Amino acid sequence: MDMKGSETINAPIDVVWAALNDPEILRQCIPGCEELQKLSDTEMTAVVVLKIGPVKARFEGAVQLSNLNPPNSYTISGEGKGGVVGFAKGGADVSLEAQGSETVLTYVVKADVGGKIAQLGARLIDSTAKKLAGQFFSSFGEKVGAGAAV
């Protein structure tokens, strides 16, 4: 499953870049995220609780940052295991472009699930993934833009 989009954030590119690398801001913006801990500049661990249709699962996993090109772009990828319900893995290529005092964040997301959760059907999983990605980037834009406006 692939999706892409963009978000205009009312903040300069260096503020947006810093927020993309701040585990506390990411934790607040990731839907269902209970915990996000930074292990190094490129590694984090996460605990996320998600409801996909009738199934609610707690995923524990690792998040990796790669292809770092500060403050212009990076790739964020992760894989979480949800016990008996299966696994989820995916990533996003994120790029930033300054436009005056604002920043345009563009993303291309790839996601995959396996195990029992995959039996829910591709349409339900795709629509849930699109909704979650949209919630994350919208929340991120609001939080970072509001912080820069203060």
Image (cartoon, rainbow, N blue to C red):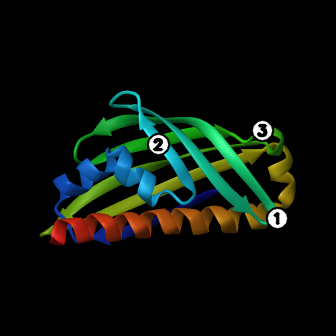
Q: Secondary structure at mark 3?
A: helix
In the rendered image, which residue does mark 3 sit on? Answer: 83
Residue 45's spot in the image, x, y percent? Answer: 50, 35
First in sequence, mark 3 or 2: give its number.
2
Q: Quadrant of the N terminus?
A: bottom right
> What residue is at 53 percent from the left and 40 percent from the top?
46
Q: Residue pushed farthest front? A: 34
Residue 139's spot in the image, x, y percent? Answer: 41, 68
Q: Which mark is residue 126?
A: none
Q: Residue pushed farthest top? A: 40
Cα–Cα gap, marks 3 and 2: 19 Å
In the rendered image, which residue does mark 1 sit on? Answer: 54
Please state which amino acid type lies under the numbered disc 1.
Pro
Q: Which mark is residue 36?
A: 2
Please state which amino acid type lies under the numbered disc 3.
Gly
Residue 87's spot in the image, x, y percent? Answer: 72, 41
> What residue is at 49 percent from the left and 56 percent from the top?
30
